């Protein structure tokens, strides 16, 4: 089993990645378990932040590292909260406060179109010149009333018209088949498999 450091301490993300990568024989270890502190995320794009986090975790651990930078972009708010999704309502990060601020920001706005973004970066080493990079979207819309007890982040307010459910109403396996993170990881795996045959 190959060890892979996840450049995140987010329990929800860890569960999703462990479930998605277990069949490929990867042991996903959160960076906090190795005493690696969180990396600064000073950039304005998901890809740049994910790359910085992956290099940081790999440098500190000496292992391959996987980093995800993800968030929600709301059309009517000029793509905010974007890369600031986790700390939209300030520090310390708090899902309930973030959701409350988002709903308040959309009061009296009828356009509720939104999408989750996931940028995934995998590096074999801190100075890997060819990191694997994938970025995907998951389209939906924001609803005022929280629905569902699964998921995390903005999931209870992220409504999927084609399913007539919020992301928080999906069971974990179903979410992994349709979510931004599930899509990104499947694309990353495809790239990994292609690279191994070249």
Image (cartoon, rainbow, N blue to C red):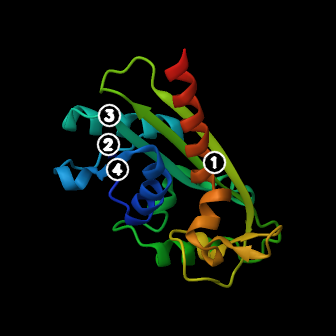
**Distance in Å between CA atoms under marks 3 and 2:** 13 Å
Residue 73 seen in render: no
In this figure, which residue is indicated by the disc labeled 3?
Answer: 64
Q: Quadrant of residue 52?
A: top left
With 154 as the anchor, is 60 left or right in this view?
left
With 194 as the anchor, is 9 left or right in this view?
left
Q: Position of residue 13 (x, y in %)?
A: 44, 59
Establish if 101 lies above or below 34: below
> Which sits earlier in the primary sequence, circle 4 or circle 3?
4
Disc 1 residue crowd, few under 14, some 14–19, many 20+, Cα 10 Å: some
> Which sits earlier in the primary sequence, circle 3 or circle 1?
3
Contact between marks 4 and 1 (CB within 8 A): the answer is no
**Mark 4 secondary-structure assignment:** strand
Q: Position of residue 119 (x, y in %)?
A: 54, 42
In this figure, which residue is indicated by the disc labeled 4?
Answer: 28
**Distance in Å between CA atoms under marks 4 and 2:** 10 Å
Q: Position of residue 6 (x, y in %)?
A: 35, 47
Of badges 4 and 2, nearer the viewer stands 2
**Distance in Å between CA atoms under marks 4 and 1:** 18 Å
Disc 2 residue crowd, few under 14, some 14–19, many 20+, Cα 10 Å: few
In this figure, which residue is indicated by the disc labeled 2?
Answer: 1
State the residue at coordinates (39%, 44%): 41
With 9 as the anchor, is 109 left or right in this view?
right
In this figure, which residue is indicated by the disc labeled 1?
Answer: 183
Establish if 126 lies above or below 89: above
> Which sits earlier in the primary sequence, circle 4 or circle 2?
2
**Distance in Å between CA atoms under marks 4 and 3:** 10 Å
**Mark 3 secondary-structure assignment:** loop
């Amino acid at each position: 089993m190959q060890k892979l450091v996840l450049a995140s301490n987010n329990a929800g993300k860890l569960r999703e990645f462990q479930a998605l990568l277990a069949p490929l024989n990867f042991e996903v270890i959160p960076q906090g378990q190795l005493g690696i502190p969180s990396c600064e995320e000073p950039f304005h794009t998901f890809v740049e932040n994910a790359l910085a986090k992956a290099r940081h975790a790999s440098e500190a651990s000496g292992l391959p590292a996987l980093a995800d930078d993800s968030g929600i972009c709301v059309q009517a708010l000029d793509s905010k909260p974007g890369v600031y999704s986790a700390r939209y309502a300030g520090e310390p990060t708090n899902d309930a406060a973030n959701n409350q601020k988002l709903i308040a920001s959309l009061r009296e706005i009828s356009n509720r179109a939104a999408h989750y973004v996931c940028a995934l970066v995998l590096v074999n080493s801190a100075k890997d010149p060819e990191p694997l990079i994938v970025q995907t979207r998951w389209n939906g819309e924001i609803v005022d009333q929280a629905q569902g007890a699964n998921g995390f982040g903005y999931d209870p307010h992220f409504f999927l018209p084609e399913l007539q459910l919020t992301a928080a109403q999906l069971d974990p396996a179903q979410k992994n088949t349709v979510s931004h993170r599930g899509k990104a990881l499947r694309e990353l795996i495809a790239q990994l498999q292609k690279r191994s045959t070249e």
